[in-house]
Image (tube, grey):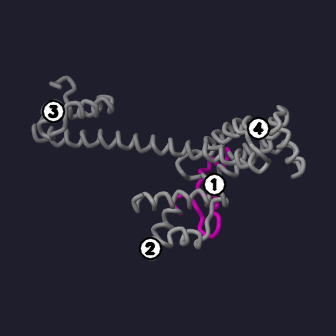
């Protein structure tokens, strides 16, 4: 494993540990994780800055709601109010419901799902501000919860069952954030390509005093006709300095 891959793997472990600890990590845990890499203070600061950018608190949890919009806060208040009608259970009662759900009891599984709905909200708050709406994160978490309670028969004990539920909820939210990030990056790449072609077309059009054809733009820029045509199509034929009726 290269040093870069090793570093990335350690960062991921640190992030997961922080999630398991309620969205925070101790400074010593971070320093210990990279101790044998012999980072100087400047390099460690970059690590801590990165973790802060991932909404991970150092030494104390961040306030997740600092990353919510007013609309998300209003929605969250309304959603939490809808959950207030659920009956409170003691730890012993929750344990009994969990064990019955593990045994395949349908009513217990439905009740267990209700019990975990507030926990889905708590987990979603840990992922606030990472590129996905809180409402969507809770929705993904609730779907994962409903799937997890149907899989409890695979767990050997209550602790493993609880771990299965929590890990599936977190995985669903992390996957949703990753998909959103990838879509955003793809959208930015498309926008960059269209803007680059539009800028080059404008420069050539200004030089020639007229709109340009794709063939002329290809000769001038060295870009292929396929690349240029793709950019024009992605823009919806909105690059005004290109003569769409001209030679392609």
SS type, badge 2: loop
Q: Which residue is mark 3?
A: 212
Q: Disc 2 to disc 4, how far (Cα)?
A: 46 Å
Q: Disc 3 to disc 1, how far (Cα)?
A: 51 Å
Q: Which-is-in-front pick, marks 2 and 1?
A: 2
Range shown magenta: 52-75
Instruction: Identify the image quadrant of the C terminus.
Output: top left
- The quadrant in which residue 111 appears is top right
Q: First in sequence, mark 3 or 2: give its number.
A: 2
Q: Is residue 119 magenta?
A: no
SS type, badge 1: helix
Q: Which residue is mark 1?
A: 126
Instruction: State the residue at coordinates (24%, 34%).
Output: 227
Q: Disc 1 to disc 4, how far (Cα)?
A: 28 Å
Instruction: State the residue at coordinates (62%, 46%).
Output: 134
Disc 1 packing (10 Å; few <14; some 14–19; many ≥20): many
Position of 17 with respect to 34 (left or right) is right
SS type, badge 3: loop
The label shown at residue 12 is: none
Instruction: State the residue at coordinates (67%, 47%).
Output: 74
| Nearest the eye: 117 or 72 | 117
Q: Which residue is mark 2?
A: 39
Q: Which residue is mark 4?
A: 153
Looking at the image, can residue 118 be seen?
Answer: no
Disc 4 packing (10 Å; few <14; some 14–19; many ≥20): some
Q: Which-is-in-front pick, marks 2 and 4?
A: 4
SS type, badge 4: helix
């Amino acid at each position: 494993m290269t040093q870069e891959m090793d570093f990335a793997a350690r960062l991921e472990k640190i992030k997961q540990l922080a999630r398991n600890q309620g969205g925070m990590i101790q400074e010593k845990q971070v320093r210990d994780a990279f101790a044998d890499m012999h980072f100087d203070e400047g390099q460690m600061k970059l690590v801590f800055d990165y973790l802060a950018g991932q909404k991970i608190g150092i030494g104390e949890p961040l306030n997740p709601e600092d990353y919510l919009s007013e609309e998300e806060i209003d929605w969250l208040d309304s959603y939490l109010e809808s959950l207030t009608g659920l009956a409170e259970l003691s730890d012993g009662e929750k344990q009994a419901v969990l064990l019955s759900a593990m045994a395949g009891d349908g009513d217990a599984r439905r009740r267990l799902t209700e019990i975990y709905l507030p926990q889905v909200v708590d987990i979603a708050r840990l992922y606030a501000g990472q590129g996905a709406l809180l409402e969507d994160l809770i929705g993904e978490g609730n779907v994962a919860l409903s799937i997890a309670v149907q899989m409890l028969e695979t767990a050997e004990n209550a602790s493993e069952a609880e771990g299965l539920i929590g890990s599936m909820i977190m995985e669903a939210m992390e996957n949703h954030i990753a998909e959103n990030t990838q879509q955003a990056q793809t959208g930015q790449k498309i926008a960059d390509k269209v803007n680059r072609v539009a800028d080059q077309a404008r420069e050539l059009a200004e030089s020639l005093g007229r709109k340009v054809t794709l063939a002329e733009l290809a000769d001038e820029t060295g870009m292929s006709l396929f690349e240029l045509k793709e950019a024009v199509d992605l823009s919806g034929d909105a690059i005004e300095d290109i003569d769409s009726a001209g030679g392609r």
